[in-house]
Amino acid sequence: MMKFRFSRKQLCIPYALFLILFVVIPMLMILFYAFTGETADGGISFTLANFADFFTSAAKLSTLLMSFTIAIISTAICLLIAYPLAYVLARSGWKKRSVLLMIFIMPMWINFVLRITALRELLDLIGLLGTENYLNTIIGMVYDFLPFMILPLYTTLEKLDTSYLEAASDLGANKLTVFTRVTFPLSMPGVISGITMVFMPSMTNYVVSDTLSNFNITILGKLIDQYFTTYDNWHMGSMISIILLVIIFLTLLATGGFKEDKDNARGANLW
Amino acid sequence: MNRRILTGALAFCLLLPSFLAFAGCASSEKETVLRVYNWEDYISEPTVNDDGSVEDDYVDLIAKFEEENPGVTVEYSTFGTNENMYNELKINAAGYDLVCPSDYMIMKMIAEDMVEPFTQDFLENSSYMRYASPYIKDLFEENGWTEYAAAYMWGTMGYVYDPELSDTVEEDLSGWGGLWQERYARVATIKDSVRDSYFLGVAYYYRDELRELAAQFESGGLNAQDYNARITEIMNRTDAETIDGVKEGLLDLKENLYGFEVDSGKQDMIVGRISINFAWSGDAVYTMDDAEPIYDEETGDLIADGIYLNYIVPEECSNIWFDGWVMPKGANVELAQKFINFLSEPENAVANMNYIGYTSAVAGDAVFDEMVDWYSEGEAGDTDENGDPLIPYDLNYFFGGTGEYDDYVIYVSEESAKRQISAQYPTQEVLTRSAIMQHFDDATNAAVNEMWEEVKGLPIPVWAYIVIAVIAALIVITALSYVYKGKRKDPKPKKGYKVLKKGA
């Protein structure tokens, strides 16, 4: 008779199932769709046409370029706003700082469609709606994703070992040097984590661009949606998803997100 | 492996939990379950309050049908786009008895042999055949849809506009090209939809040809039928030259627009954020209703401020659209036809029109009475508040023969004739220049979609190129600095010092 032995490994079964059903299989299907096309008689055949079509279409390339630009600018602005804030917050000795942090994070708890709709009214009041489409979209992205930048930065900076900073000061570094040579490099895991968390959704979150630009700006996420819901071409939709995936992967690689660094093991890196 | 199996597998993965939940109850009462798949908000149903109580403001048509047909349960589900509906049918072919796609999707489904024909009995004596407007029935007969589809709601496309916008707005918008005029910069929206915008683009591109036809028709050189056929031919052109012309036209228009919209156009018109909207007639009625000022019925005091908006179908042409019921292959035909007949009873059509605001394809005296109730301002010979005589609004073409009345004419003031009634029931003159837009084949569809993508994705502003250039430069500089650093030799040690080997 076989004996059933419970081991710790079996605790992973629920997640393994989830992983297979909702991650692995869908990924494989997207891959399958991306590299296939319908033949004239309704059959399915392997093709690279979707890939070639993407990189020869002026519309798709300009959409890619525009999404990229919007995402980069939004991410940079988020970083510029979030870093000083997280720095001050983490360095301050104030005991109630978690309350302050909560205030910055709280917007995340309100449905984002609602927030964007409200923002649309606000932009209309200021007079930007309908005229400054790009600016509005960037404002929306920053507004929406700022908490995702603040959180990882704050966690990294808060856990920073102050003895490094003290050592640097002891050895004669002034405050600026301490920051540029010690604090900032040590906070890189948080910066990278923040960048990935803002950059990725900024390229695809078309609710923001549609609502705030009155559908004047198309970003990649919108294009994917169009191919699945209105153009009825799942092959191209899947191909765009794969291309987006590769871009994000490359961005991660470029920013060193996959570095097996000891600093990354601090728990500050949310990925 | 074909696509259906694959999509099925995907659906299975995603819907596994719900499949398990529903597996038990799906099969038992198949004969008496009618599965209806309709657009969102497209059948009369009462308002449900937050606390779960049900208001009695609108008729609950589904409950009424179940009441009239004991033992029948309606499983009602909704979709958001024709393509979503189509894909769902491809995955779950036997899942529905009755669906309500738009015109072009019905054509596509008929062409792909996806729909069940009506029974002979239905075609000969049914409430639908009795009460559906002769105009709609003729239209279906001409196009060969009678056997497969029953019209539900229909209408035209035109501009909803604020007549106070400028002195010449009515004249300017009597041509589709009015929207391209600089004086209407940033006050107008069009639909974020390929087909509707393509129609607008074609009407603009061929505006001179269409005007010429109109002149010929007016001077008697062309009869109504030929005129309509010529317009239909033009509006269905999809050759490369047309598509390119439409693209240029729409790109120009984009510069002048406030934006595109899916559903926000109605609200933006009502609050006055925009002043012109390219709209489906049904949405136009809704917009005009909601924008009007509200007066107290007894005292006549103004309760809520508002504006009176107008609806206009430009003189070149319009698009006649409809949504209709079709039965997917394998449907419960008898029950589905029963439901269509139920919806075709004029009193139920009135309930639907009250709720949805669109125009039912069903005529009949009950519907006409409701229209008289809504729009009539008096009898022949009466005058309006300014002392001008009321003008007759002739609806015989639509209602004739579906009821007991001899004459279906409503008398309205000249002002009112430009408002809701003109959107609800276009005049016969408007219908003469209204074309049905055919369903595109796959190659055409791809070309038109590509055109639309370019309209939506271009042009890229100059600053975006600069940003990209700066980023590229930064990347190159960083990369170079790394390369340079790597090549630099370690500094020589000072005299008297020795460099230890790394790791020593």
Image: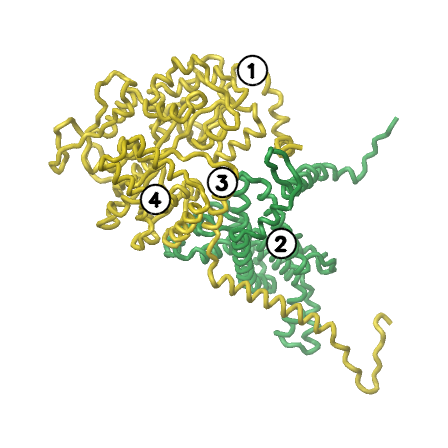
Labels 2 and 3 in the same subunit: no
Residue at screen point 23% across, 18% down: B405
Say which chain tag 4 marks: B
Which comes before the other along the chain, label 3 or label 4?
4
Labels 2 and 1 in the same subunit: no
Q: Which residue bears the numbered disc 4?
A: B277
For residue B29, the mark is: 1
Instruction: State the separation of the CA atoms marked 3 and 4.
Output: 27 Å
Question: Which class describes the residues within 10 Å of circle 2: few (<14), some (14-19), or many (20+)?
Answer: some
Image quadrant of residue A160? bottom right
Colour of chain A, in one word, is: green
Q: Are marks 2 and 1 in contact (CB under 8 Å)?
A: no
Instruction: State the separation of the CA atoms marked 2 and 3.
Output: 31 Å
**What residue occupies the far bottom of the structure in this picture?**
B495
Say which chain tag 2 marks: A
Q: Are marks 1 and 3 in contact (CB under 8 Å)?
A: no
The amino acid marked with disc number 4 is Asn
Q: In the rendering, at what x and y percent does residue B4 appear? A: 61, 31
Label 1 element class: loop
Q: Which residue bears the numbered disc 3?
A: B444
Q: Which of labels 2 and 3 is toward the front? A: 3
Colour of chain B, in one word, is: yellow
The amino acid marked with disc number 3 is Thr
Label 3 element class: helix
